Each structure stands twice: as C-alpha cells, then as structure tokens.
Amino acid sequence: MTVFRSASVQKASTLAEHYYTSPEIFEQETQRIFHNHWICVGRGEQIVDVGDYFLAQIGAENLIILRDAQGCARAFFNVCRHRRTRLCQSPHGQLGEMICCTHHGWRYSLEGQLRSARRESVPAEESALFACALYEWEGFLWVNLAPNPVPFTQTVSPLLSQFAPWRLASLRVVEQITDEVQANWKLIFQAYCDRYLYTPTANRSPSLSAGAFLGASQAIDRDVLPLPGLRGEQGNRAYYYSLFPTMLLSLYPSHAIALRLYPQAADRTRIVCEWLSDRSAMSAVAMETWKRNHRQAWFGCEQMQRRHTARSMHANGLTAFDREYLRVLGASAFGLPQNYAWQQGH
Ligand code: FES
C-alpha cells in the first residue's frame, strides 16, 4: 500500500521513495506518461524500403513501425482485427506489399486497409488496422498512443529548429548499445540531467531550465573536423538535451549520441544508446571509452535503486525533471490532492 506524506511542493526536497519502486505508480506512469506522450522509437533509416518494418514496445502495447507504399512511415498496433492475434512476431523484417495474418489469412495493405478476408465479408470501418500517431523529425521516429494527441510540432515547438545545424536526419547510426539496467527510468533520466544539465560550471551554461525540455551547453576542445552545417562556436561546444519523458540527446561538433529509455518495470529499464555520425565508423578507442563511461553511469543508477529499495536514499533537492514529472503525473492520479505527492528530505 502506497503511503503519501503531506508537504508543499515549495518545501519538497526530492521524489518520495515509492516513485522509484512502486508497481502501482509504474502502472500510472504507463497510462499517463508513456501511453500519452510522444515517444521516440527509432530512426527512419531502420525502414528505408517500402515494406520494411520493426516492432516497438511501449508499456503494454506492441507496435508495427513500417514504410508504406508511398514511402511514409506509419505505426499500427500489432493486432489483427479478426481475433486480435499478434500480426508480426520477428523484431524487424520486410513485409512485401501486404501484412498477412498467419491465423486465418486476413491480408492488410501497408496503409492498414483490409484487402482480403478469405470468405468473410467485413464492414470497412471494422476491418482496418488500429493506427497510432507517428511523426518523423530529424531522422527520429516518434509515436504517440493517445487517441487524439497534441500535434508533435506543437509539443516540441521550443526545439523545432534547434538541431537543424547538425543535420541529424542525414547522419547514420554507426554504433548501438542496448543495456538492461536494474533501475527505475527516472534515476537514469536524472543521472543524465545531474551530469550535464543541472550543475552550472565555469564553461557550462543552461539554455532551457524548466518544463519538458532541458538544455545546456559547454565549451570543449575542438579535436576533429566539425559537421558541415555547424557555424561559429557550435564547432567547439557540446550541447545536451533531455526530452521528457524518455529521450536524451548529446550533440558534439563531429557526432551526436541519442539515448532512448524503455521502462520495463518500476526497477528495470532498457536503454538503447546510438552514436550518429556522417562517417562510416568510430575509432575503437572512442568506442571503448563510450561503452565504459555509459556502463559506469548505469552501475551508479543500479546502486541508487538499491538504496531506494533499502530506504536509505539521500535527498538532493526537487529538480526541474522532478517538477515536470509530478506536473504530468499529477497526485490526483491516486485520488489525492496535488500537495500530497511529495516527501520531505531525510
Ligand atoms: S486472427 Fe488474424 S485472420 Fe484470424
């Protein structure tokens, strides 16, 4: 049973422990956040040709992300309209011209329309695949499971042209690491923010410090040829962004690193980390350093998760991420007034 202690947001010092451990809260997050926000699920380059597809899991929902006959990316719930069987099993592949259900042979076009149902006559409005909103931006594919989502361009309006000089859509994934981390997704998000966004230093300055998007940049040594679209100080600065709820993006003069979080349970998160570049490969030394740094960071998150479970966490203050998270989740989700959602520090 989750217990909430009364405190005002002004006095609150951190999220309460159960926000990192409670299956009930994780279920609320799934419904209110992951099923209701734009979530990055991959790159357009994963579905280059007509009929290419991959599967994406968001909370309890499995989606088919595909390239249709007109070359547009689309997303459908991975269920047949006949008996709700899963249509695609392999994590990625090539569909050809149709999506075929192996159970009773219904066939759908790549636009989701039923094309043949064997001997059955099915009304058109009851036969199309259930579609989900998808938007392709800067080479990334974003989906939103809400029935009537806020348009993507409206949601990300503060960032819409922010990344243009890096020409992210033209970059390619040259390395990818997938890690299964035994820690709550918020600890990972906060670890990134703590490291890159919250702490002002002599050479680091924040650009976005509240709301769904946080950003900061810092001066770094120029040691490589910058990407062709960068101008002026962009050639010797690193830019860090968090895009609520599950994406973290680091932009460097020669490349970009994108992290996508896939929360699996209150204490488990899958992290897909991609290195994007206009070159065909990265150096072995850079690769090893990158992997080592990331795994150290995730190990730290797992240690923090254990401390949360052991009820001995240390409070560092309610952060911009915490405030945005609580605003979106809302204590009313638990039938409690808003100011019952926070806990005083220890
Ligand atoms: S369940 Fe798909 S055709 Fe019957």
Image (cartoon, grey):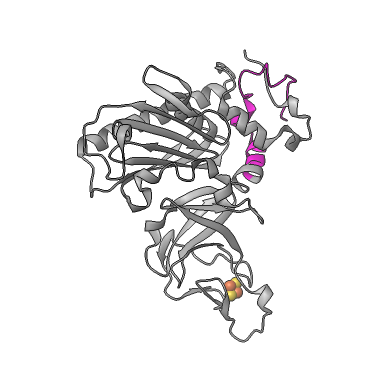
Q: Main secondary structure of the magenta part?
A: loop
Q: Nearer the viewer, residue 72 or 308?
A: 72
Percent x, y of residue 302:
47, 28
Q: How many marks?
A: 0
Q: Nearer the viewer, residue 101 or 326?
A: 326
Judge whether residue 164 can be spotted in this image. yes
Q: Residue at x 23, y 42 (%)?
A: 282
Relative to 3, 120 lies left or right:
left
Name of the residue lying farthest toward the top: 346
Picture quadrant of ligand 1 = bottom right
Q: Residue at x 72, y 32 (%)?
A: 331
Judge whether residue 302 can be spotted in this image. no
Q: Residue at x 63, y 52 (%)?
A: 149
Relative to 309, 221 lies left or right:
left
Percent x, y of residue 9:
69, 22
Start and end of the magenta stretch?
A: 1-30
Quadrant where the N terminus is found in the figure = top right
For residue 219: magenta? no
Residue 54 to residue 283: above or below: below
Q: Residue at x 53, y 28 (%)?
A: 209
Residue 33 to residue 97: above or below: above
Percent x, y of residue 106:
56, 77
